[in-house]
Amino acid sequence: PIVLRHVTVRIAGGSKVGLVGRTGSGKSSFLLCVARLNNIVGGRVVLDGLDCDSVPLARLRGALLAVGCEQHRAGAAPR
C-alpha cells in the first residue's frame, strides 16, 4: 500500500532535522524512503540537490542517523 502521499520537504544542506509526530503519522516511513528501504511510487527524494537514486547506498545511509525515543511516564522510574 502507498503510505505517504503529496509530501514535500525542503531542508537546507548541512541542517540537522528531527521528525516528530503522533504514532502512525509516517515518521518511520519517511525515513525509510529517504534511505531507499521503501519503494517510491512516483516522485523522488532529493537531498542537497542530489537525487537519492543517484547516490551510492553506503554513502546515502552513512549520512543518516535515526534515534528512537521511548515513552516514559512522568514520575516513573526507567526500566
Image (spheres, rainbow, N blue to C red):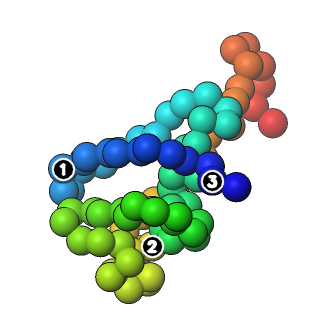
Residue at (77% x, 25% y) in the render: 77
Distance between the alpha carbons at the discs numbered 3 and 1: 27 Å
Tell me which corner region of the image, top left, top right, bottom left or bottom right, holds residue 8.
top left
Residue sitting at the far right = 79
Q: Which residue is mark 2?
A: 61
Residue at (38% x, 86% y) in the render: 56
The location of residue 59, given as percent across then percent down, is 37, 80
Tell me which corner region of the image, top left, top right, bottom left or bottom right, holds residue 58.
bottom left
Amino acid carrying label 2: it is Arg
Name the disc covering residue 26, or none. Answer: none
Q: Is residue 52 above or below residue 33?
A: below
Q: Is residue 75 visible to us here?
A: yes
Badge 3: few (under 14), some or many (20 or more) residues near its Cα, within 10 Å? few
Q: Which residue is mark 1?
A: 12
- Of marks 2 and 3, the one in the foreground: 3
Residue 6 or residue 38, whichever sits in front: 6
The secondary element bearing badge 1 is classed as loop
Residue 78 or residue 20, whichever sits in front: 20
The secondary element bearing badge 3 is classed as loop
Name the disc covering residue 2, or none. Answer: 3
Quick one: label 2 or label 1, which is nearer the N terminus? 1
In what quadrant of the picture does the N terminus appear? bottom right
Residue 6 or residue 69, whichever sits in front: 6
Distance between the alpha carbons at the discs numbered 2 and 1: 18 Å
